[in-house]
Amino acid sequence: MSIDDVIVVTTDNVPGYRVVRVIGLVSASSARARGLGRDITAGIRNILGGSVVEYKELLEATRDEALRELREKAKKMGANAVVGVRLTTSMIAQGVAEVVWYGTAVVVEPV
């Protein structure tokens, strides 16, 4: 089973599956800093208005990295799914964004 086979849902159950074992809390985080070049470009966009693509791409990569880590941790725990998944973000330092995914690692099987 690859980490892509680990089902991740925000609901408390997975349609078509039943939870046969609850393993426990699993979480993963990723933090990334903005670069000077991105800050300058984003600053100009902020003045002129419009979508700040540089930050959007940074946060998307950060979310993806943390989600990949969540799946890896769940798999190492023996889970094949994570239910009740939530996402939180924060600025942990000037210019540094953190993304945290968390949920309950479980074993599910088809009904």
Image (cartoon, rainbow, N blue to C red):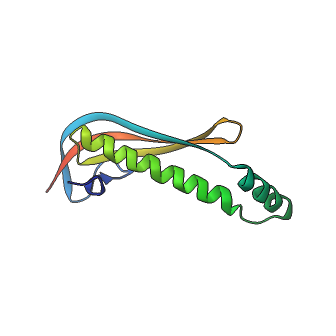
* Residue 84 in view of the camera: no
| Above or below: residue 50 compared with residue 111 | below
Is residue 54 toward the left or the right of residue 23 in the image? right
Total numbered badges shown on the rendered structure: 0
Residue 64, given in percent of the width and then of the height, sits at 46, 53
Quadrant in the picture for the N terminus? bottom left
Q: Nearer the viewer, residue 15 or 25?
A: 25
| x and y percentages locating residue 104 in the rendered image | 32, 39
Quarter residue 21 falls in: top left
* Residue at screen point 85% across, 64% down: 48
In the picture as drawn, the residue positioned furthest to the right comes out as: 47
In the rendered view, does 62 fall on the left or right side of 55? left
**Could you tell me which residue is drawn at 83 percent across and 60 percent down?**
44
Asked which quadrant contains residue 4, the reply is bottom left
The spot of residue 65 in percent (x, y) is 46, 50
Quadrant holding the C terminus:
bottom left
In this view, the residue in front, 10 or 41, is: 41
Residue 36 visible at all: yes
User: What residue sits 24% from the left and 37% below the top?
Assistant: 77
